Structure formats: C-alpha cells, structure tokens
Image: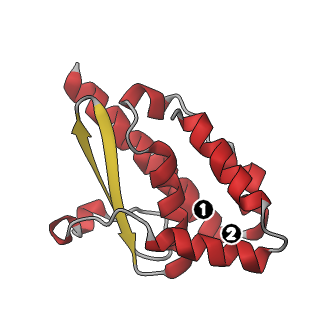
Amino acid sequence: MTINEIQDELIDEFSMFGDWMEKYEYIIQLGKELPLIKEEYKQPENLIRGCQAQVWLHADLQDGRVHFTADSDAIITKGLVSMVVRVLSGHTPEEIINSELYFVDKIGLREHLSVTRSNGLLAMIKQMKIYALAHQAKAN
C-alpha cells in the first residue's frame, strides 16, 4: 500500500465513529497495536523533542525501506505515534520525505487535540522525516 492509501484507510476507519469519545477510544486501541521499540533503544537520544509525554522512536533501514518502532508513556500519545508509524513505516526514505500527511486534518485531529499534543504529533512526523533523510544520505 502507498502512504496515501494507508492514510485513506485511516480516514475511512475514523469516519465510522460518531463522536470524539469513540475516536479517542480507537486511538487508544491503535496504540496497543504499535510495533514497540526495543528496550535497548529507549535512550535519551531516541526521545522526540517537542512532545510533552515521553515518546521514543527508532528507525531501521531494511531492503531500502524505513521501518519505525516507537513507544510512549502516555496512552493517547502512544495511539498518535502508532498512526504515523502505520502510515510511514515500510516505505522508502524518498516516499517518506515527500509525503504529505493529510490524514491529520481529515480525521480532525488538529482540531480535537490540545495544542501540546498537536505540537507533539508534528514533532513525531518531523523526526520521522529526519530519520528518512538520514537514511537516504547514508545510502547515497
């Protein structure tokens, strides 16, 4: 699946819920499905700056594709990082760098998250693109 197809799938999933309490419950459920970062990568250098909660993110390049794992100590934040990992993991660095993550607005996350959570989500996306850039630079 392409990044846009995964985003469209997420938008469809969220359209099934009638209110934001149900959507928050689904975000929490997505957090439980997050591919967890190995304990050895839960180091300060893997913490995402700009998140109020602790969010660890690790990126590996395998067969030309970036695979992300993550974890958070906050349940909603864990769900948020789970969504961006689902959308961006398994794609080439170039695809990740050039992606436009429209699902954040289409789902209504930007309107329904606190300013700190919204800024944290943007910091996660930014860090994932930085990892993709770093892997692309190493490959060249």
Which colour scheme appears in the figure?
secondary structure
Residue position for label 1: 119
Q: Residue at x 24, y 70 (%)?
A: 42
Compared across the picture, whether 108 is left or right of 117 comes to right
Say what secondary structure mark 1 lies in: helix
Q: Position of residue 1 (x, y in %)?
A: 51, 35
**Image height of 56 relative to 19, above or below:** above
- The image shows residue 139 at horizontal and vertical percentages of 21, 24
The x and y percentages for residue 58 are 29, 55
In the image, taking residue 69 as reference, residue 34 lies left or right, namely: right
Q: Residues within 10 Å of mark 2 (few under 14, many from 20)?
A: few
Image quarter hosting the C terminus:
top left
Distance between the Cα atoms at labels 1 and 2? Answer: 6 Å
Between 112 and 137, the residue placed more toward the observer is: 112
70 left or right, relative to 20? left
Q: Is residue 55 visible?
A: no
Say what secondary structure mark 2 lies in.
helix
At a point 55% along the width and 33% down the height, the residue shown is 99
Position of 84 relative to 135 (above/below) = below
Marks 1 and 2 in Cβ contact (< 8 Å): yes
Tally the marks: 2
- Give, as a three-letter code, the residue at label 1: Asn
Query: Horizontal placement of 67 versus 78: left or right?
Result: left
Which image quarter: residue 14? Answer: bottom right
Between 88 and 132, the one nearer to me in the picture: 88
Q: Residues within 10 Å of mark 1 (few under 14, many from 20)?
A: some
User: Which quarter of the picture shows residue 39?
Assistant: bottom left
Residue under the image location 51 percent in, 46 percent down: 87
State the residue position of label 2: 115
Q: Amino acid at mark 2?
A: Val
